[in-house]
C-alpha cells in the first residue's frame, strides 16, 4: 500500500533522506522509529504529497505520489507533528471545516463529524474551543480530523508525543481499532517500546537511512534475546546448579547475576526444556525459569549508531 524506492531528499547540501526503500503492506501498522532529525517527517511529507523528493519514487496504493496528488490526498490521512493554532474555533466547527475542505456534502457533514468524535472519544468536547483542549485531546482531535474523509491510509507523525501514559495507551487502542477497520497505518515515534505492541513491522531510520526493517520478532532474533534464559534456584543451590548446567552442550554461556543464573543457548530457546530437566534430575529446587525480556532501549542503541545529521 505504501512503497518508496531509492527515495532521496536534499535540503541544500544536507542529505535528509538517502535511498530509502520502504514497503508497507495493506492493513499493516508500520512503526517508523528514529532519533531527532532522522528524516521521519521528511519521508511522511513526501508520501502525503506535501513535499517533493530530490530523487527516487514513492507510491501509495500503486500510484506515483508525484503524478496523482489529488487522488492520493483523498486516499491518505496525514497528521502532522504540529497541529497549529485555531483561535476561537470550536471542536465541531474545526471538524466541519475539514469536512467541507474534503468536499463532503453539507447534509452529511454533521453525521460524519459525530462519527469521528465518537471514534476518538471526544463527543463531550464537541462545543469546546480547540485551543482549550488538553494536549492529549488535541492529539485525538488531530486523529479525528484525518479520519473525516475515511482514508484507507493513515500517515501519523508522532501522534503520541507529549502524552501521559494513559493517553498513550488510549491512542494505541484507537490505532488498533483503526487497523481492525482495515486501514494501513504508518506511524512515527522516537521510542521503539511505544510501538512494540501494535506494530506489524518497524523501520528504524537514522541520518536518512534505514538501518533496520523487520518485525519485532526479527529485532528479538537480531538481539539474540531468543537465546537467553534466566533461572533462579533455591538458596545455596546456585553453584551446584551451574556445575550441572555446564555439562549441557546446547548452552553457550552461563553467567551468575545476584540470585539469578543467566544462560545463553547456542541456538533458539526451543532447547530450554533441557535446563529444567537437568536441574530437576540433579534435585535442584527451581524457583523460576524465564526467557530474557527484550530491552528496547538496548535494541535501539544497538541498531542505531548515534550519528547526528
Ligand atoms: N525545511 C527544511 N530546511 C532545511 N533542512 C530541513 C528542513 N526540514 C528538515 N530539515 C533537516 O532534515 C533532516 C531531517 O529532518 P526531519 O524533520 O525529517 O527529521 P525527523 O526524523 O522528523 O526528526 P524529529 O524526530 O525531530 O521530528 C534534519 O537534519 C533537519 O534539520
Ligand atoms: Mg519529525
Image: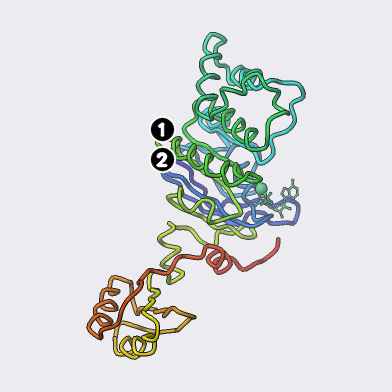
Q: Residue at x 63, y 37 (%)?
A: 136
Quadrant where the N terminus sits is top left
Q: Quadrant of residue 160?
A: top right
**Residue 211 percent across, percent down from the top left:** 54, 62
**Residue 307 percent across, percent down from the top left:** 67, 66
> What residue occupies the far front of the structure in this picture?
235
105 over 134 or under it: above or below = above
**Residue 127 percent across, percent down from the top left:** 65, 18
- Mark 2 or 1: in front is 1
85 over 265 or under it: above or below = above
Instruction: Mark 2 or mark 1: name the one nearer the start of the chain.
Output: 2
Q: Residue at x 36, y 80 (%)?
A: 234
- Asked whether 219 or 7 is in front, the reply is 219
132 over 201 or under it: above or below = above
SS class, disc 1: loop
Please give the residue where the numbered disc 1 appears in the rendered image.
181
Q: How many marks?
A: 2
For the residues marked 2 and 1, what is the alpha-carbon distance in whole angstroms?
A: 9 Å
CB of residue at label 1: within 8 Å of ligand 2?
no
Q: Quadrant of residue 137?
A: top right
- Asked whether 278 or 29 is in front, the reply is 278
**Residue 163 percent across, percent down from the top left:** 63, 44
Q: Residue at x 31, y 79 (%)?
A: 285
- Mark number displayed over residue 27: 2
SS class, disc 2: loop
- Asked whether 243 or 286 is in front, the reply is 286
Is 37 displayed left or right of 203 in the figure? Answer: right
Amino acid at each position: 500500500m505504501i512503497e518508496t524506492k531509492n527515495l532521496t531528499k536534499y535540503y541544500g547540501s544536507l542529505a535528509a533522506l538517502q535511498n530509502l526503500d520502504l514497503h508497507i503492506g495493506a492493513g499493516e501498522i508500520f512503526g517508523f522509529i528514529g532519533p531527532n532529525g532522522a528524516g521521519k517527517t521528511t519521508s511522511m511529507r513526501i508520501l502525503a504529497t506535501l513535499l517533493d523528493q530530490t530523487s527516487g519514487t514513492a507510491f501509495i496504493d500503486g500510484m506515483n505520489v508525484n503524478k496523482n496528488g489529488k487522488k492520493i490526498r483523498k486516499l491518505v490521512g496525514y497528521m502532522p507533528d504540529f497541529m497549529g493554532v485555531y483561535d476561537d474555533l470550536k471542536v465541531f466547527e474545526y471538524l466541519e471545516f475539514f469536512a467541507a475542505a474534503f468536499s463532503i456534502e453539507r447534509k452529511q457533514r454533521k453525521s460524519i463529524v459525530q462519527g469521528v468524535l465518537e471514534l476518538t472519544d471526544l463527543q463531550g468536547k464537541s462545543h469546546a474551543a480547540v485551543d482549550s483542549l488538553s494536549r492529549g485531546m488535541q492529539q485525538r482531535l488531530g486523529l479525528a480530523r484525518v479520519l473525516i474523509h475515511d482514508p484507507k491510509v493513515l500517515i501519523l507523525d508522532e501522534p503520541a508525543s507529549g502524552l501521559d501514559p494513559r493517553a498513550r495507551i488510549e491512542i494505541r487502542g484507537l490505532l488498533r481499532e483503526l487497523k481492525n477497520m482495515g486501514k494501513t497505518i504508518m506511524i512515527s515515534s522516537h521510542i521503539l517500546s511505544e510501538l512494540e505492541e501494535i506494530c506489524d513491522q518497524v523501520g528504524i531510520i537514522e541520518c536518512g537511512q534505514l538501518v533496520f526493517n523487520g518485525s519485532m520478532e526479527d529485532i528479538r532474533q537480531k538481539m539474540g534475546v531468543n537465546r537467553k534464559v534466566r533461572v533462579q534456584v533455591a538458596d545455596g543451590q546456585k553453584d551446584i546448579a551451574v556445575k550441572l548446567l555446564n555439562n549441557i552442550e546446547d548452552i553457550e554461556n552461563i553467567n551468575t547475576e545476584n540470585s539469578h543464573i543467566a544462560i545463553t543457548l547456542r541456538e533458539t530457546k526451543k532447547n530450554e526444556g533441557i535446563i529444567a530437566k537437568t536441574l530437576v534430575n540433579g534435585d535442584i529446587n527451581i524457583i523460576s525459569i524465564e526467557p530474557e525480556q527484550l530491552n528496547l532501549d538496548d535494541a535501539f542503541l544497538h541498531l542505531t549508531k548515534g550519528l547526528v545529521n
